[in-house]
Image (cartoon, grey):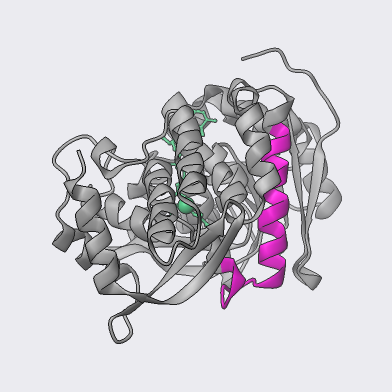
Amino acid sequence: MTATVRTDPALVKVALGARSYDIVIGRGVIASLGARIAALRPGAKSFIVTDDNVARYVLADAEAALTRAGVAASRVIVPPGEASKSYRVLEQVCEAIIASRIERGDLVIALGGGVIGDLAGFAAAVVRRGLDYVQAPTTLLAQVDSSVGGKTAIDSALGKNLIGAFHQPILVLADTALLDTLPEREFRAGYAEVAKYGLLGDAAFFAWLEANWRDVFSGGPAREQAVAACCRAKAAIVASDERETGERALLNLGHTFGHALEAACGFSDRLLHGEAIAIGMALAFEFSARRQGLVSKAAAARAARHLAEVGLPTRIQDVPGPPPSVDQLMDLIAQDKKVRRGMLTFILVRGIGAAFIEAGVDAREVRAFLSEKLAER
Ligand SMILES: NC(=O)c1ccc[n+]([C@@H]2O[C@H](COP(=O)([O-])OP(=O)(O)OC[C@H]3O[C@@H](n4cnc5c(N)ncnc54)[C@H](O)[C@@H]3O)[C@@H](O)[C@H]2O)c1
Ligand SMILES: [Zn+2]
């Protein structure tokens, strides 16, 4: 671990009326887990859901923080990885919560990355028809994206995140020091979502990232600032469109191309989600530049340059192994999205920080674009 310089944690509010909550961001804030829970829900018991990796690095500190504040805690530890977002593991988690006599008024704590947040959040949504829960995200992706906004889910055999619920947490506690033990590749993949906030809606933040990304990676004060900026952006979008009927879809910049690539790789280690999204965002910029010249070629190149600079892939050819075919990618895009009369909805860009929702993208145009991209060497 790098030396811990304690500064005041950053606070971001998610304004959702009676379901409003705070996001607390800072190095070392996990030590305040128990005290914050005791203040929010005096007398409540807690139940931690975590995975083996997180248990190794973080569980002892989290449990100590709860004990110090007099918050009773029991727990379940599940295997790491997407495979835990399954009916089988959900059942184990729900049964463990019930066996620990967690009742309405008590709390579930999701201590882990996006897999744990989605799984524990969904368990909390359904056990006893809904328990309160706290997100304690431990990956960069979870701190800037999945822990905020209340989307919870497990996977169906037919697709990711198809069994789920909107269920907002009562607190998000993002300790940026916990990211020090995250494998570098996971950190970098999570950074794709950080860059996404700049690319979709905040050109000044993107320019700041171009100047400060090294400090974000090494765990200096810029890391906390970056996580806080992303949470502010996500909180604002969620507050205005909690259930994704409009603006929240902007958060899917790069995700149509990205999901197709992830699926083509069988959601394997060949391509992590954030890596797929980095390629997807580079493609979304290029596609926008090609299509009616929405964005300048220079801006598209600048977006890709920054992603490549931090070590993220930006071209389909960067994915190790044999590339997917155009047919395969188009099939996967059609599965991911409703195609209405040959038209697809895409998040396109007018410039860096200026994404918009375009419902009338001709599937033939997408096919032609991807054919060109796949033909490049
Ligand atoms: N709900 C949402 O809004 C939303 C948004 C984006 C993504 N997601 C979901 O998030 C999931 C991906 O999340 P993720 O990228 O965090 O993956 P993850 O939870 O699998 O974590 C990645 C790896 O890092 C390990 N890890 C976690 N914290 C660690 C730490 N501090 N030190 C060392 N290792 C640690 C984990 O054990 C795992 O092996 C996907 O299932 C995706 O669908 C949900
Ligand atoms: Zn994503």
Indicate whether 207 appears above or below 337.
above
One can see residue 112 in this view: no
Residue 228 location in percent, x, y?
A: 72, 43
Q: Can residue 115 be seen?
A: yes
Q: In this rendering, would 145 be left or right of 229? A: left
Question: Which of the two residues, 309 or 225, is positioned nearer the viewer here?
Answer: 309
Most extreme residue toward the bottom, as rendered?
341
Q: Could you tell me residue 220's position as x and y percent?
A: 69, 22
Residue at 33% over, 84% down: 340
Q: Nearer the viewer, residue 319 or 113?
A: 319
Residue 373 within the segment the image draws in magenta: no
Give the side of residue 117 with respect to residue 86, left or right. right
**Relative horizontal placement of residue 105, taking residue 347 as reference (left or right):** right
Q: Is residue 243 left or right of residue 15?
A: left
Q: Quadrant location of the N terminus?
A: top right
Which residues are drawn in magenta?
Answer: 224-248
Where is residue 206? Give x, y as percent: 63, 42
Residue 45 position in % (x across, y down): 70, 50
Q: Residue at x 62, y 53 (%)?
A: 353
Q: Is residue 241 above or below residue 178?
A: below
The verdict on residue 230 being magenta is yes
Above-or-below relation of 150 to 78: below
Which residue is found at the position 60% from the left and 28% from the top? 213
Frontmost residue, 294 versus 116:
294
Image quadrant holding the C terminus, namely: top left
> Residue at 23% of width from left, 63% of height from top?
368
Placement of 136 over or under 64, stated as above or below: below
Q: How many marks?
A: 0
**Picture quadrant of residue 370:** bottom left
Q: Which is the main secondary structure of the residues drawn in magenta?
A: helix
